[in-house]
Image (cartoon, rainbow, N blue to C red):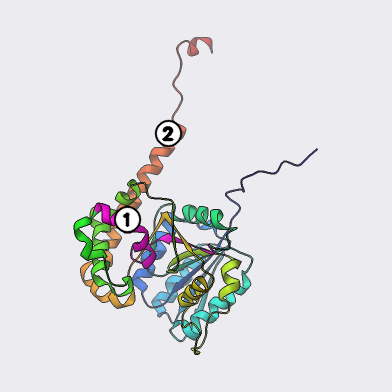
Amino acid sequence: MNKIVPLRANRAAVRPVLMLLTSHRLDCFLLSLRCLERFTNLARFKKIYIVANAVSPDHAAILNRFMHTHERVEVIHCSPRGLMPAVNTVQNEILERHRDDVVVKLDEDVFVTPRWLEHLLEGYRLHSFSRDVPLVSALCPVSPHGLYALGRYLKTAHPTARTMYDGGIVEENWVYHRWMWEKVVREDFVQGFLASDPQPYFYTGFASINCVVFDARLMEAILPLPTEPLPGLPVSDEQAVNMVLAANKCKTAVVSRAVAHHYSFSRCEEYLRSHVPLDAVWHYLQEVWREEQIVAKAGALRRFRPAPVQDGAAASS
Protein backbone atom coordinates (compact mmCIF):
# COMPACT_ATOMS: atom_id res chain seq x y z
CA MET A 1 0.00 0.00 0.00
CA ASN A 2 1.29 3.45 -0.89
CA LYS A 3 2.17 5.72 1.99
CA ILE A 4 -0.04 8.80 2.37
CA VAL A 5 2.02 11.95 2.84
CA PRO A 6 0.17 15.05 4.11
CA LEU A 7 0.61 18.12 1.93
CA ARG A 8 0.64 20.47 4.94
CA ALA A 9 3.19 19.98 7.69
CA ASN A 10 1.94 19.27 11.20
CA ARG A 11 1.40 22.62 12.90
CA ALA A 12 2.55 21.22 16.24
CA ALA A 13 5.83 19.88 14.83
CA VAL A 14 7.98 22.96 15.54
CA ARG A 15 9.30 23.03 19.11
CA PRO A 16 11.54 26.07 19.29
CA VAL A 17 14.26 26.93 21.76
CA LEU A 18 13.69 30.18 23.65
CA MET A 19 16.67 32.42 24.43
CA LEU A 20 15.74 35.28 26.78
CA LEU A 21 18.35 37.96 27.51
CA THR A 22 18.25 39.97 30.74
CA SER A 23 20.59 42.37 32.50
CA HIS A 24 19.80 45.39 34.68
CA ARG A 25 16.16 46.28 34.01
CA LEU A 26 14.57 44.11 36.67
CA ASP A 27 11.17 45.83 36.57
CA CYS A 28 10.95 45.33 32.80
CA PHE A 29 12.05 41.73 33.16
CA LEU A 30 9.38 41.00 35.79
CA LEU A 31 6.68 42.30 33.46
CA SER A 32 8.22 40.41 30.54
CA LEU A 33 8.14 37.15 32.53
CA ARG A 34 4.56 37.74 33.63
CA CYS A 35 3.42 38.26 30.05
CA LEU A 36 5.40 35.25 28.89
CA GLU A 37 3.71 33.04 31.50
CA ARG A 38 0.23 34.42 30.86
CA PHE A 39 0.20 34.50 27.08
CA THR A 40 2.39 31.54 26.19
CA ASN A 41 2.19 27.79 26.51
CA LEU A 42 5.74 27.31 27.79
CA ALA A 43 5.50 23.57 27.10
CA ARG A 44 5.82 24.48 23.41
CA PHE A 45 9.49 25.23 23.98
CA LYS A 46 12.02 22.44 23.69
CA LYS A 47 14.34 24.37 26.00
CA ILE A 48 14.34 27.80 27.66
CA TYR A 49 17.64 29.58 28.23
CA ILE A 50 17.83 32.77 30.26
CA VAL A 51 21.10 34.62 29.72
CA ALA A 52 21.60 36.68 32.89
CA ASN A 53 24.22 39.36 32.41
CA ALA A 54 25.65 40.75 35.66
CA VAL A 55 22.28 40.69 37.41
CA SER A 56 21.60 41.78 41.00
CA PRO A 57 20.99 39.25 43.82
CA ASP A 58 17.23 40.00 43.75
CA HIS A 59 17.21 39.47 39.99
CA ALA A 60 19.07 36.17 40.40
CA ALA A 61 16.56 34.99 43.04
CA ILE A 62 13.64 35.62 40.67
CA LEU A 63 15.45 33.72 37.92
CA ASN A 64 16.08 30.82 40.26
CA ARG A 65 12.40 30.67 41.20
CA PHE A 66 11.33 30.74 37.54
CA MET A 67 13.81 27.98 36.73
CA HIS A 68 12.38 25.74 39.45
CA THR A 69 8.78 26.57 38.58
CA HIS A 70 8.95 25.55 34.91
CA GLU A 71 10.50 22.57 33.18
CA ARG A 72 13.45 22.68 30.77
CA VAL A 73 14.66 26.09 31.99
CA GLU A 74 18.38 26.82 32.29
CA VAL A 75 19.74 30.09 33.66
CA ILE A 76 23.25 31.01 32.52
CA HIS A 77 24.97 33.81 34.44
CA CYS A 78 27.71 35.81 32.76
CA SER A 79 29.74 38.96 33.40
CA PRO A 80 30.96 41.67 33.04
CA ARG A 81 27.97 43.63 31.82
CA GLY A 82 27.75 44.05 28.08
CA LEU A 83 27.27 42.14 24.85
CA MET A 84 31.02 41.79 24.37
CA PRO A 85 32.45 39.51 25.53
CA ALA A 86 30.00 38.08 28.07
CA VAL A 87 26.55 37.88 26.44
CA ASN A 88 27.75 37.07 22.94
CA THR A 89 30.01 34.32 24.26
CA VAL A 90 27.00 32.64 25.87
CA GLN A 91 24.84 33.22 22.79
CA ASN A 92 27.51 31.57 20.65
CA GLU A 93 27.50 28.51 22.91
CA ILE A 94 23.71 28.22 22.90
CA LEU A 95 23.34 28.70 19.15
CA GLU A 96 26.14 26.25 18.37
CA ARG A 97 24.37 23.70 20.56
CA HIS A 98 21.09 24.27 18.70
CA ARG A 99 22.13 24.75 15.08
CA ASP A 100 19.51 22.22 14.02
CA ASP A 101 16.71 23.83 16.04
CA VAL A 102 14.40 26.79 15.62
CA VAL A 103 15.37 29.59 18.01
CA VAL A 104 13.17 32.35 19.41
CA LYS A 105 15.13 35.27 20.85
CA LEU A 106 13.50 37.71 23.29
CA ASP A 107 14.81 40.77 25.15
CA GLU A 108 14.06 41.60 28.78
CA ASP A 109 11.98 44.68 27.94
CA VAL A 110 9.62 42.96 25.48
CA PHE A 111 6.07 42.17 26.59
CA VAL A 112 4.32 39.53 24.52
CA THR A 113 0.57 39.45 23.89
CA PRO A 114 -2.03 36.69 23.28
CA ARG A 115 -1.14 34.14 20.57
CA TRP A 116 2.13 35.87 19.74
CA LEU A 117 4.02 32.57 19.54
CA GLU A 118 1.43 30.84 17.36
CA HIS A 119 1.46 33.71 14.86
CA LEU A 120 5.26 34.00 14.96
CA LEU A 121 5.75 30.28 14.30
CA GLU A 122 3.17 30.35 11.51
CA GLY A 123 5.24 33.09 9.91
CA TYR A 124 8.35 30.99 10.39
CA ARG A 125 6.71 27.95 8.75
CA LEU A 126 5.67 29.99 5.75
CA HIS A 127 9.21 31.30 5.19
CA SER A 128 11.19 28.29 6.40
CA PHE A 129 12.23 27.25 2.89
CA SER A 130 13.18 30.74 1.72
CA ARG A 131 16.85 31.67 1.53
CA ASP A 132 15.80 35.29 1.10
CA VAL A 133 13.85 35.52 4.38
CA PRO A 134 16.00 33.93 7.12
CA LEU A 135 14.49 35.99 9.94
CA VAL A 136 10.89 36.41 11.12
CA SER A 137 9.94 39.05 13.67
CA ALA A 138 6.99 39.93 15.83
CA LEU A 139 5.54 43.38 15.24
CA CYS A 140 6.96 45.65 17.96
CA PRO A 141 5.45 49.16 17.57
CA VAL A 142 8.46 50.80 19.24
CA SER A 143 11.09 49.51 16.83
CA PRO A 144 12.32 50.45 13.34
CA HIS A 145 10.58 47.55 11.58
CA GLY A 146 7.47 48.12 13.68
CA LEU A 147 7.23 51.70 12.48
CA TYR A 148 7.82 50.51 8.92
CA ALA A 149 4.97 48.00 9.15
CA LEU A 150 2.65 50.54 10.77
CA GLY A 151 3.50 53.31 8.30
CA ARG A 152 0.50 53.09 6.00
CA TYR A 153 -1.96 52.64 8.88
CA LEU A 154 -0.50 55.62 10.75
CA LYS A 155 -0.86 57.86 7.72
CA THR A 156 -4.47 56.76 7.28
CA ALA A 157 -5.63 56.69 10.90
CA HIS A 158 -3.51 59.55 12.28
CA PRO A 159 -2.80 61.91 9.38
CA THR A 160 -2.59 65.02 11.56
CA ALA A 161 0.03 63.51 13.88
CA ARG A 162 2.77 62.99 11.31
CA THR A 163 5.28 64.97 13.37
CA MET A 164 4.94 62.30 16.05
CA TYR A 165 5.93 59.36 13.87
CA ASP A 166 7.66 60.87 10.82
CA GLY A 167 11.35 61.66 10.87
CA GLY A 168 14.24 60.61 13.06
CA ILE A 169 15.46 57.11 13.77
CA VAL A 170 13.27 55.22 16.22
CA GLU A 171 16.15 54.35 18.58
CA GLU A 172 16.63 58.04 19.38
CA ASN A 173 13.14 59.41 18.77
CA TRP A 174 11.75 60.07 22.25
CA VAL A 175 8.71 61.82 20.72
CA TYR A 176 7.72 58.62 18.90
CA HIS A 177 8.35 56.49 22.01
CA ARG A 178 5.99 58.56 24.11
CA TRP A 179 3.34 59.09 21.43
CA MET A 180 3.15 55.42 20.48
CA TRP A 181 2.98 54.17 24.06
CA GLU A 182 0.25 56.68 24.89
CA LYS A 183 -1.73 55.42 21.89
CA VAL A 184 -1.21 51.82 22.98
CA VAL A 185 -2.17 52.15 26.64
CA ARG A 186 -4.91 54.80 26.33
CA GLU A 187 -6.50 54.45 22.90
CA ASP A 188 -6.36 50.72 22.11
CA PHE A 189 -4.02 51.34 19.20
CA VAL A 190 -3.26 47.65 18.58
CA GLN A 191 -6.90 46.65 18.17
CA GLY A 192 -7.43 49.55 15.80
CA PHE A 193 -4.49 48.43 13.68
CA LEU A 194 -5.59 44.79 13.59
CA ALA A 195 -9.17 45.81 12.80
CA SER A 196 -7.88 47.59 9.69
CA ASP A 197 -7.10 44.14 8.24
CA PRO A 198 -3.38 44.70 7.56
CA GLN A 199 -1.44 42.50 5.19
CA PRO A 200 -0.15 39.37 6.96
CA TYR A 201 3.55 40.13 6.49
CA PHE A 202 5.69 43.18 5.95
CA TYR A 203 9.19 42.77 4.51
CA THR A 204 12.12 44.95 5.52
CA GLY A 205 15.77 44.86 4.52
CA PHE A 206 16.82 45.40 8.13
CA ALA A 207 16.06 43.89 11.53
CA SER A 208 15.44 44.73 15.15
CA ILE A 209 16.06 41.53 17.09
CA ASN A 210 13.92 42.22 20.17
CA CYS A 211 11.50 39.35 19.41
CA VAL A 212 12.52 37.14 16.48
CA VAL A 213 12.64 33.53 15.30
CA PHE A 214 15.30 31.98 13.07
CA ASP A 215 17.10 28.75 12.25
CA ALA A 216 20.36 27.46 10.76
CA ARG A 217 20.01 29.66 7.67
CA LEU A 218 20.79 32.71 9.81
CA MET A 219 23.01 30.98 12.37
CA GLU A 220 25.41 29.75 9.69
CA ALA A 221 25.78 33.30 8.42
CA ILE A 222 26.30 35.17 11.72
CA LEU A 223 28.18 32.72 13.95
CA PRO A 224 30.33 33.29 15.80
CA LEU A 225 28.95 36.56 17.16
CA PRO A 226 31.64 39.13 17.97
CA THR A 227 33.24 38.85 21.41
CA GLU A 228 35.77 41.66 20.95
CA PRO A 229 35.79 44.84 18.84
CA LEU A 230 37.78 44.40 15.65
CA PRO A 231 38.03 46.76 12.63
CA GLY A 232 35.47 45.99 9.95
CA LEU A 233 33.52 43.55 12.09
CA PRO A 234 30.15 44.10 13.80
CA VAL A 235 30.06 45.27 17.40
CA SER A 236 26.72 43.71 18.40
CA ASP A 237 24.52 40.74 17.57
CA GLU A 238 21.96 43.01 15.90
CA GLN A 239 24.62 44.64 13.76
CA ALA A 240 25.86 41.18 12.75
CA VAL A 241 22.37 40.22 11.63
CA ASN A 242 21.88 43.44 9.68
CA MET A 243 25.25 43.09 7.95
CA VAL A 244 24.24 39.60 6.78
CA LEU A 245 20.84 40.82 5.55
CA ALA A 246 22.45 43.67 3.61
CA ALA A 247 25.28 41.58 2.14
CA ASN A 248 22.91 38.87 0.89
CA LYS A 249 20.00 41.15 -0.04
CA CYS A 250 17.79 39.26 2.42
CA LYS A 251 14.64 40.38 4.20
CA THR A 252 13.00 40.20 7.60
CA ALA A 253 9.35 39.13 7.61
CA VAL A 254 7.38 41.11 10.20
CA VAL A 255 4.23 39.24 11.28
CA SER A 256 1.42 41.76 11.64
CA ARG A 257 -0.61 39.66 14.11
CA ALA A 258 2.29 38.57 16.31
CA VAL A 259 2.33 41.67 18.51
CA ALA A 260 5.01 42.11 21.16
CA HIS A 261 5.62 45.43 22.88
CA HIS A 262 9.21 46.63 23.12
CA TYR A 263 9.36 49.19 25.93
CA SER A 264 12.26 51.45 25.07
CA PHE A 265 15.64 51.94 23.48
CA SER A 266 18.27 53.06 25.97
CA ARG A 267 18.58 56.68 24.80
CA CYS A 268 14.85 57.29 25.31
CA GLU A 269 14.27 55.19 28.40
CA GLU A 270 14.64 57.86 31.09
CA TYR A 271 12.28 60.25 29.28
CA LEU A 272 9.73 57.51 28.56
CA ARG A 273 9.69 56.33 32.18
CA SER A 274 8.76 59.83 33.31
CA HIS A 275 5.77 60.03 30.92
CA VAL A 276 4.59 56.44 30.37
CA PRO A 277 5.85 54.53 33.41
CA LEU A 278 5.79 50.77 33.60
CA ASP A 279 2.80 50.97 35.96
CA ALA A 280 0.71 52.32 33.06
CA VAL A 281 1.98 49.54 30.79
CA TRP A 282 1.21 46.97 33.50
CA HIS A 283 -2.38 48.22 33.87
CA TYR A 284 -2.84 48.03 30.10
CA LEU A 285 -1.49 44.48 29.94
CA GLN A 286 -3.69 43.52 32.89
CA GLU A 287 -6.68 44.64 30.85
CA VAL A 288 -5.44 42.62 27.88
CA TRP A 289 -5.23 39.62 30.21
CA ARG A 290 -8.76 40.14 31.54
CA GLU A 291 -10.17 40.43 28.04
CA GLU A 292 -8.35 37.27 27.03
CA GLN A 293 -9.85 35.44 30.00
CA ILE A 294 -13.35 36.56 29.01
CA VAL A 295 -12.80 35.33 25.44
CA ALA A 296 -11.45 32.00 26.71
CA LYS A 297 -14.40 31.48 29.06
CA ALA A 298 -16.88 32.35 26.32
CA GLY A 299 -15.20 29.83 24.03
CA ALA A 300 -15.36 27.16 26.73
CA LEU A 301 -19.06 27.80 27.26
CA ARG A 302 -19.73 27.44 23.53
CA ARG A 303 -17.79 24.17 23.40
CA PHE A 304 -19.49 22.57 26.39
CA ARG A 305 -23.01 24.03 26.17
CA PRO A 306 -25.51 21.11 26.34
CA ALA A 307 -27.33 20.44 23.09
CA PRO A 308 -31.02 21.43 23.23
CA VAL A 309 -33.45 18.54 23.65
CA GLN A 310 -35.59 18.12 20.56
CA ASP A 311 -39.34 17.67 20.78
CA GLY A 312 -40.23 14.07 21.43
CA ALA A 313 -36.72 13.11 22.46
CA ALA A 314 -37.65 12.56 26.11
CA ALA A 315 -40.68 10.43 25.17
CA SER A 316 -38.68 8.21 22.87
CA SER A 317 -35.85 7.63 25.34
- N-term mark: 2 or 1: 1
Along the viewing direction, whichever of 155 and 101 lies nearer the viewer: 155
Query: Which residue bears the numbered disc 1?
Result: 152
**Please, which residue is most extreme toward the right here?**
1
Query: Which residue bears the numbered disc 2?
Result: 302
Check disc 2 and report its element: helix, strand or loop: helix
Count the marks.
2
Specify the segment rendered in magenta: 133-157
Residue 222: name its quadrant.
Answer: bottom right
Quadrant showing the C terminus: top right
Along the viewing direction, whichever of 310 and 82 lies nearer the viewer: 82
User: Are there few (<14), some (14-19), or many (20+) residues within 10 Å of tag 2?
Assistant: few
Q: Is residue 144 magenta?
A: yes
Give amino acid for label 1: Arg
Q: x, y percentage for residue 20?
A: 47, 69
Q: Is residue 310 magenta?
A: no
